Amino acid sequence: MAINHIVLEELQDEEDNTRSLILETYKSSEASQDKDTLKLTGLDDIVIFLASRVVLPIAASFTSRVLYDKYKNMQTMSQAEQARQEIVTQPMGNQDLIDKQLVIEEISMKLLEEGISEIQAREIVAQVYTRLEQRYLD
């Protein structure tokens, strides 16, 4: 049975899981073989925000088109925090879901822009979508 609201702690747990996925992808990519470069570029901070840019729009897509459109292009950590707070207050399933493939495609582009390959970006976003879908919509 589907849950009526997204729980903040579960959303944050999913962001943590996604951070790990993205970080592993960066560290294993050919472009980042120099581990010292990873430390110098502040990759950890980038990955924290990238995880939010993946998880939060997907979660928003389960609540409404308006929230999804509002947060799919977020640019700041303060927007991410605002998204978290707004998403957890919205009921799920009141409107038609946004097409899963559209969400995966649009959100994958955020990772692609940050140097993750298209295949890896789609895999990460599809995994996150599936986990959230199983948690909240099944």
Image: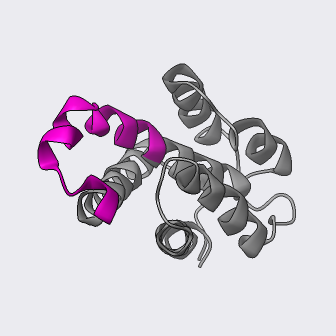
Instruction: Give the quadrant of the C terminus.
Output: bottom right
In the foreground, 36 or 106: 36
**Residue interval drawn in magenta:** 30-50
Residue at image point 49% right, 25% down = 77
Instruction: Give the quadrant of the N terminus.
Output: bottom right
How many labels were placed on the picture? 0
Asked if residue 126 is among those painted magenta in the image, a careful observer would answer no
Please indicate whether residue 44 sits to the left or right of residue 8 in the image: left
Q: Where is residue 98 in the image (x, y as percent from the top left)?
A: 81, 64
Q: In the image as oriented, which residue stretches furthest toward the left?
A: 36
In the foreground, 136 or 67: 67
Residue at image point 80% right, 71% down = 99
When the figure is inspected, residue 41 is found, relative to residue 28, above or below; the finding is above
Asked if residue 43 is among those painted magenta in the image, a careful observer would answer yes
When the figure is inspected, residue 70 is found, relative to residue 103, above or below; the finding is above
What secondary structure is the magenta-colored segment mainly?
Answer: helix
Q: Where is residue 134 in the image (x, y as percent from the top left)?
A: 52, 76
Q: Where is residue 129 in the image (x, y as percent from the top left)?
A: 56, 68
Residue at image point 58% right, 41% down = 88
